[in-house]
Image (cartoon, rainbow, N blue to C red):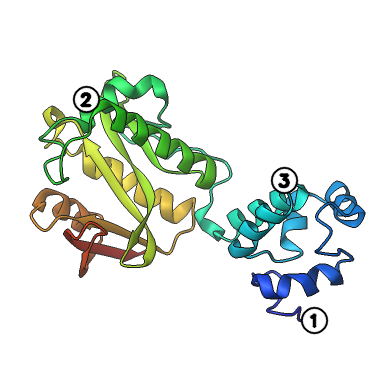
């Protein structure tokens, strides 16, 4: 298999090598709306078009600035998402129900429940402070972006038997000291804690990460004094990997496992 400048076909290259690769495809990179570009865009599926140049995330940004919204900008975005590999779930389906719990995506209609959950000082005792209603809405919107971009996030969990709101649980990308991993996290209503719901939901999300997303690693970021969450992490098969500092300077413990 021949090599393109900057790497092998199917692997990303940086902006410095994109020009030559586009020329190999018959596209002049200086022509943001070239006939050749639009011809390729109309004749090939967008995902395949994105893979052909092997666009890097840096190039995505450069094209967005230079191309004024033409097809290559879209193709670059598709490529960026595909380069996340198995961390993207195009089907966007939540984990299957467990014995007692169900999962679904959050919506703005869940604001009352989420504001009560994230505003509870007991639930949020290992955070700097509880969240107000506006911050709870931002939490929902953050997860909605994760659903769109990755196909997963924190899902809302309810009781199968009654539909009663329990909390949230799921998977989110987290940066720890410059390294991004997928974290498993949850919040359970204070009055429902101690019944095994956190472990049950988190175990379903761990299995989902392995069996649906094909992830090979999972972490949990836990405050040193949050003993209950450390116990849940150990039950899930995670072990203490290291001590770390968050961007705000707080000390945390990173639990991790290979899947």
Q: Earlier in the sequence, mark 2 or mark 1?
A: 1
> Which label belongs to residue 189?
none
Callout 3: 10 Å neighbours few (<14), some, many (20+)? Answer: few
Task: Quarter of the image for the N terminus: give it.
Answer: bottom right
**Residue at 87% in and 50% down:** 38
Spatial separation of the CA atoms under disc 3 and disc 1: 31 Å
In the rendered image, the vertical position of residue 204 relative to residue 51, given as above or below: above
Cβ atoms at labels 3 and 1 below 8 Å apart: no
Residue holding disc 1: 2
**Residue at 18% in and 60% down:** 252
Q: Where residue 78 sits in the image (x, y, percent)?
A: 66, 52
Q: Earlier in the sequence, mark 3 or mark 2?
A: 3
Task: Quarter of the image for the C terminus: give it.
Answer: bottom left
Spatial separation of the CA atoms under disc 2 and disc 1: 58 Å
Residue holding disc 3: 69
Q: As drawn, is 229 to the left or to the right of 29?
A: left
Where disc 3 sits, the SS reads loop
Q: Where residue 189 sits in the image (x, y, percent)?
A: 18, 30
Q: As drawn, is 54 to the left or to the right of 190?
A: right
> Which label belongs to residue 116?
2
- In this view of the protein, which residue sits in the foreground, 95 or 28? 28
Where disc 1 sits, the SS reads loop
**Residue at 23% in and 63% down:** 254
Which quadrant would residue 26 be assigned to in this image? bottom right
| Of marks 3 and 1, the one in the foreground | 3
| Of marks 3 and 2, the one in the foreground | 3
- Quick check: can you spot residue 11? no
Total numbered labels placed on residues in the image: 3
Spatial separation of the CA atoms under disc 3 and disc 2: 41 Å
Callout 2: 10 Å neighbours few (<14), some, many (20+)? Answer: some
Cβ atoms at labels 3 and 2 below 8 Å apart: no
In the rendered image, the vertical position of residue 256 relative to residue 137, given as above or below: below
């Amino acid at each position: 298999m021949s090599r393109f400048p900057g790497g092998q076909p199917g692997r990303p290259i940086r902006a410095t090598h994109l020009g030559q690769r586009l020329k190999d495809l018959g596209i002049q990179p200086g022509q943001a709306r070239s006939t050749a570009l639009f011809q390729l865009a109309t004749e090939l599926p967008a995902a395949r078009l994105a893979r052909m140049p092997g666009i890097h995330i840096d190039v995505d940004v450069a094209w967005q600035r230079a191309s004024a919204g033409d097809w290559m900008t879209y193709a670059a975005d598709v490529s960026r998402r595909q380069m996340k590999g198995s961390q993207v779930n195009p089907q966007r389906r939540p984990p299957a129900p467990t014995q007692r719990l169900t999962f679904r995506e959050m919506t703005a209609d869940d604001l009352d429940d989420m504001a009560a959950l994230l505003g509870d000082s007991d639930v949020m005792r290992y955070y700097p402070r509880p969240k107000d209603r506006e911050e709870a809405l931002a939490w929902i919107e953050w997860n909605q972006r994760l659903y769109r971009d990755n196909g997963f996030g924190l899902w809302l969990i309810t009781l199968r038997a009654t539909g009663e709101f329990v909390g949230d649980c799921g998977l989110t990308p987290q940066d720890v000291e410059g390294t991004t991993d997928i974290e498993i996290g949850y919040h359970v209503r204070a009055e429902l804690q101690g019944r095994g719901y956190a472990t049950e939901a988190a175990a379903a999300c761990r299995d989902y990460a392995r069996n649906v997303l094909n992830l090979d690693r999972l972490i949990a970021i836990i405050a040193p004094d949050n003993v209950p969450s450390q116990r849940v992490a150990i039950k899930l098969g995670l072990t203490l990997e290291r001590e770390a500092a968050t961007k705000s300077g707080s000390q945390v413990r990173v639990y991790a496992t290979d899947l």
